Image (tube, helix red, strand yellow):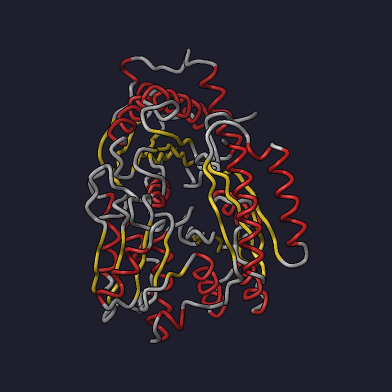
Amino acid sequence: MTRKLFGTDGIRGKSNVAPIDAQTALSVAMAAGALFRREVGHRPLVVIGKDTRLSGYLLEPAVTAGFIAVGLDVVLLGPLPTPAVGVLTRSLRADLGVVISASHNPFDDNGIKLFGPDGFKLSDAVEAEIEARIDGGHDGDLVTAAKLGRARRLDDAPGRYIEFVKSSFPRQLRLDGLKVVVDCAQGAAYRVAPAVLFELGAEVVPISVAPDGLNINRDCGATAPEAMCRAVLEQGADLGLALDGDADRVILADEKGLPIDGDQVMGLIAASWLARGELKGESVIGTVMCNLGLERHLNEMGIGLFRTPVGDRYVVERMRATGCNLGGEPSGHVVMSDYSTTGDGLIAALQVLAVLVASGRPASEVCRVFEPLPQLLRNVRFGLGRPLEQDSVKAAIAAGESRLAGRGRLLIRKSGTEPVIRVMAEGEDETLIVEVVEEIARSIEEAAR
């Protein structure tokens, strides 16, 4: 079965416009609820979390109503990171988890992500089955008045997640004496992230912790870490961390205010876990976007790197298939399956902080574990049409591949969450990489006009 609503990370789009409108949200919840009610054979429970977007007030009650209409009980978590929903879905023995978030996208986007009872995102096959139920209507799905579900808020949800995250940090260590800047992107972690760091002993400098529904990810967070980097320098901090809107990714900064991406974080954690005998499968799962420098660094330690398509769900699927417990993306998604079912920016940052504390050395020495090869990524936004199918674009891509043959690699892909084509090239010759990317990006822009 094919999927029309679901993309690489749930359903996503502009708020109050189909499919991110109240009617579709209601229908998705009814279909998903009826499907899981049938499969589990009892009155199911669903937990719902969200980020801080204004449109969450539109989608949360619509989704809640849909589940109640088909007989599911609902637990509302309020604003909470995506990984927290996965954790609490399992902790509460729920049958389904829902995250209302568009992650790193602007405030006027939103999305719906679904988790199964194991806390993992639903498979493509299950999402296709939900869509099929929507297409078939909801005859027979609605329950009688006496069997309607109930909804309640879990007031201590943030506290439960805070304790869970703290449990991932070695008990013999504390963050006393460290000053840490944390940029919460005006998003879902605006309360829990500073609390975790404070309770572990750090001097915390929180920024972007005043969400108003419209400012999530605006010039802040993991997609715009410049504000965090400046704050590290201004405050004389030992480390900075910038989360995105739903806190499933993190970008760090050392004490010099220089950014540290997900590749460096994965390389550091892999070495730390290997030394402690905790790295499973002697491999790390990355994506096609991971820098070749990371692969070489891991190989030197006897660690393999397996690449997947872009998207943390594909990383997780490969991790589950191979038994590996570490994976991620340079964008800052770092998945540690010993702790979480999806990327968790806060837990990833704590793993780095644990290495800093144990070593007693500054982040600039500890966190730069390999020299990345020159890599350039251009995001080319387009409207209607299919630029990648145009002959002029195909010719530009072929020419770029020919120029990079034996000296680098080229990756062209359409984003699964927004109307953007990503053009990435990597290799030893930085000048050549820039030329190749600019030529292909220009051809896409012209074809999209």
Please state the horizontal and vertical placement of residue 416, each as a whole percent of the image.
55, 42
Percent position of residue 166, x then y? 34, 65
Q: Is residue 158 left or right of residue 374?
A: left
x 27%, y 76%: residue: 179
Picture quadrant where residue 287 is located: bottom right
Q: Residue at x 45, y 18 (%)?
A: 141
Q: Quadrant of the N terminus?
A: top right
- Image coordinates of residue 402 in percent, x first then y, are 77, 57
Q: Nearer the viewer, residue 390 or 78?
A: 390
* Residue under the image location 30 percent in, 39 percent down: 76
> On the rendered image, what quadrant is the C terminus found in?
top right
Comparing 423 with 327, the one in front is 423
The total of numbered circles placed on residues is 0
Query: Residue shown at 58%/37% (left/top)?
Result: 448
Is 40 located above or below residue 364 in the figure?
above
> Quarter-wise, where is residue 242 in the image?
bottom left
Residue 227: image location, x then y, percent:
32, 63
Considering every residue shown, the one lying at the far bottom of the view is 360
Side of 13 relative to 305 (left or right):
left
Compared with residue 111, is residue 271 higher up or lower down, i.e. above or below?
A: below
